[in-house]
Image (cartoon, rainbow, N blue to C red):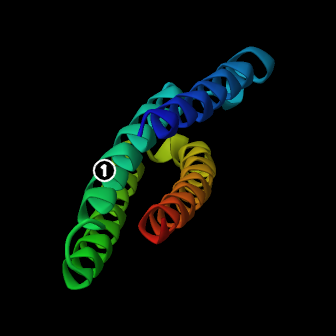
């Protein structure tokens, strides 16, 4: 878990630096939500990863239920955040949507790779 958290922090810091680079290089394209989205995705990814990895040590049925439930829950949270921002700040909607999609893809790829590695490591532990 320690390695996962360090990797998550590195990715998050990289994205925060990228959002500040946008602020310095193209200030008209920057919105304050950009660095806050990094925090949002990092926290949600960490919570989802913790739930899923703990569920792996239970029965397969429980794992599948928690994995699918957490995935659907996170997607609904994403929809709520997107809708709330787009309805309250329509002038910044396009920039927010682009930043949100970039964050979503980066953290989705990160979490998928982390879960595949975790499953592989657990299989190796059980075989030994």
Q: Nearer the viewer, residue 117 or 76?
A: 117
Q: Is residue 26 left or right of residue 59?
A: right
Q: Secondary structure at mark 1?
A: helix
Q: Is residue 45 left or right of residue 14?
A: left
Q: Quadrant of residue 88?
A: top left
Residue at screen point 30% across, 47% down? 47
Q: Quadrant of the N terminus?
A: top left
Q: Position of residue 104 (x, y in %)?
A: 54, 54
Residue identified by numbered label 1: 50
Q: Is residue 112 above or below residue 21?
A: below
Q: Quadrant of residue 78?
A: bottom left
Q: Position of residue 86 (x, y in %)?
A: 42, 51
Residue at screen point 52% across, 27% down? 35
Residue at screen point 31% across, 71% down? 67
Residue 56 seen in this snapshot: yes
Instruction: Give the farthest residue toward the front.
Output: 128
């Amino acid at each position: 878990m320690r390695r996962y958290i360090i990797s998550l922090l590195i990715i998050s810091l990289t994205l925060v630096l990228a959002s500040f680079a946008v602020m310095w290089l193209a200030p008209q394209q920057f919105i304050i939500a950009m660095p806050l989205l990094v925090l949002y995705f990092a926290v949600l990814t960490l919570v989802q990863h913790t739930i899923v990895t703990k569920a792996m040590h239970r029965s397969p049925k429980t794992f599948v239920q928690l994995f699918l439930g957490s995935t659907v829950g996170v997607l609904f949270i994403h929809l709520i955040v997107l809708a709330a921002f787009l309805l309250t700040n329509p002038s910044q909607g396009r920039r927010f949507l682009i930043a949100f999609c970039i964050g979503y893809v980066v953290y989705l790829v990160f979490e998928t790779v982390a879960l595949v590695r975790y499953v592989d490591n657990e299989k190796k532990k059980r075989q030994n």
